[in-house]
Image: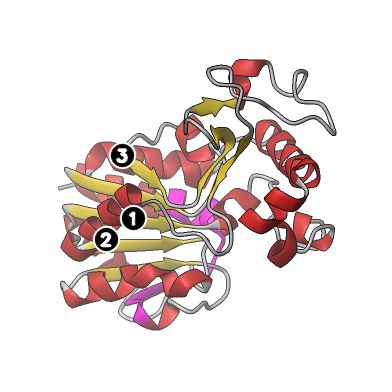
């Protein structure tokens, strides 16, 4: 396992002794579950231009096309399974007294792995929101995908209004409640884990800067350097699915041995 100095032993000790932990995850974590990112060669952005499709304007002009794009994504999400990184983060949540996972991912792999103390800052691909009464529905409540076939538009069962994917699109603000929870956790943590995200979207929302200002140790778990790696005390240049379980096994072994 490769890491930036200080030593690997120090990394394990930092994780062992931490009490207030903030985790920031991105598409790289879900990619290890076989869920292509939008920018992969087989991702949706190769078929659909994000700047013209993942926007409120695109939905107003052609909601059928936008919904068909997200139906593809929903099918991909439902067929994917949590990987060891997702499961390890759920285990870590049980250990640390103060813990929050903030994810940019719109899938439900963290939840299916067992994570509960978490916020989703970009929305949920398996939810839709009524444009009129703002009611949020889980598409699985409608026997997805049978009732939402191609070229149909889902309607609200309460008021009949048109529903849209409950996703934060380009040009929209992230929801205030999950964002503020993430900022508070980042500003108060003594350990921040950056996992599977380059931090290029909105500069990582300043989470790393908040953590660093509080004196937190920052660990970047990514195969390649990203925009946030410069803030990291430790850079673990491996996929999270292999690195995180190994790191956590060493932490728990260290704890057991006293």
Question: In the picture provided, is 140 more to the left or to the right than 137?
Answer: right
Residue annotated with mark 2: 183
Question: Few, some or many C-alpha atoms within 10 Å of disc 3 (few <14, some 14-19, many ≥20)?
Answer: some
Neighbor class of circle 2 (other Cα within 10 Å; few <14, some 14-19, many 20+) is some
Asked if the residues shown at circle 1 and circle 2 are in contact, with their CB atoms under 8 angstroms apart, the answer is yes
- The vertical placement of 96 against 79, above or below, is below
Q: CA distance from mark 1 to mark 2?
A: 6 Å
Q: Nearer the viewer, residue 101 or 133?
A: 133
Q: In the image, is residue 190 above or below residue 93?
A: below
Please indicate whether residue 39 sits to the left or right of residue 138 in the image: right
**Residue tagged 1:** 179
Percent of width and height locating residue 105: 53, 50
Given contact means CB atoms under 8 Å apart, are the residues at marks 3 and 2 in contact? no
Using the numbered discs, state the Cα–Cα distance from disc 1 to disc 3 in whole angstroms: 14 Å
From which residue to which does the magenta span run?
231-246
Q: Is residue 236 visible?
A: no
- The percent position of residue 58, horizontal first and vertical second, equals 71, 55
Residue at 73% in and 40% down: 67
| Residue named by callout 3 | 117
- Say which of marks 3 and 2 sits in front: 2
Q: CA distance from mark 3 to mark 2?
A: 14 Å
Which tag, 1 or 3, sits closer to the chain's start? Answer: 3
Task: Name the secondary structure under disc 1.
Answer: helix
Q: Quadrant of residue 210?
A: bottom left
Q: Is residue 167 visible?
A: yes
Of residues 232 and 52, the one drawn nearer to the viewer in this rendering: 52
In the rendered image, the vertical position of residue 252 relative to residue 149, given as above or below? below
Q: For numbered disc 2, what is the local secondary structure?
A: helix
Upstream in sequence: badge 3 or badge 2: 3
């Amino acid at each position: 396992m490769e890491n930036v100095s200080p030593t690997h032993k120090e990394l394990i000790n930092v994780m062992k002794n931490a009490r207030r932990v903030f985790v920031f995850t991105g598409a790289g974590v879900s990619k290890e579950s076989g869920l292509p990112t939008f920018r992969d060669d087989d991702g949706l952005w190769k078929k659909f231009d994000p700047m013209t499709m993942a926007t409120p304007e695109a939905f107003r002009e052609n909601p059928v096309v936008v919904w068909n794009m997200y139906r593809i994504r929903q099918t991909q999400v439902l067929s994917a399974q949590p990987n060891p990184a997702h499961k390890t983060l759920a285990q870590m949540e049980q250990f640390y007294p103060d813990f929050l996972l903030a994810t940019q991912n719109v899938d439900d792999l963290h939840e299916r792995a067992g994570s509960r103390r978490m916020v989703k800052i970009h929305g949920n691909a398996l939810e839709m929101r009524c444009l009129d009464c703002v009611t949020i529905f889980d598409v699985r409540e409608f026997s997805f995908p049978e009732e939402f076939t191609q070229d149909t538009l889902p309607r609200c069962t309460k008021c009949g209004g048109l529903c849209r994917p409950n996703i934060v699109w380009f040009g929209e603000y992230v929801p205030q409640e999950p964002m503020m929870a993430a900022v508070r956790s980042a500003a108060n943590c003594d350990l921040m884990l950056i996992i599977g995200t380059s931090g290029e979207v909105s500069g990582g929302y300043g989470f790393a800067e908040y953590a660093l200002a509080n004196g937190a140790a920052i660990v970047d778990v990514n195969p390649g350097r990203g925009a946030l790696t410069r803030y990291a005390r430790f850079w673990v240049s491996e996929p999270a699915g292999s690195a995180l379980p190994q790191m956590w096994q060493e932490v728990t072994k260290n704890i057991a041995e006293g």
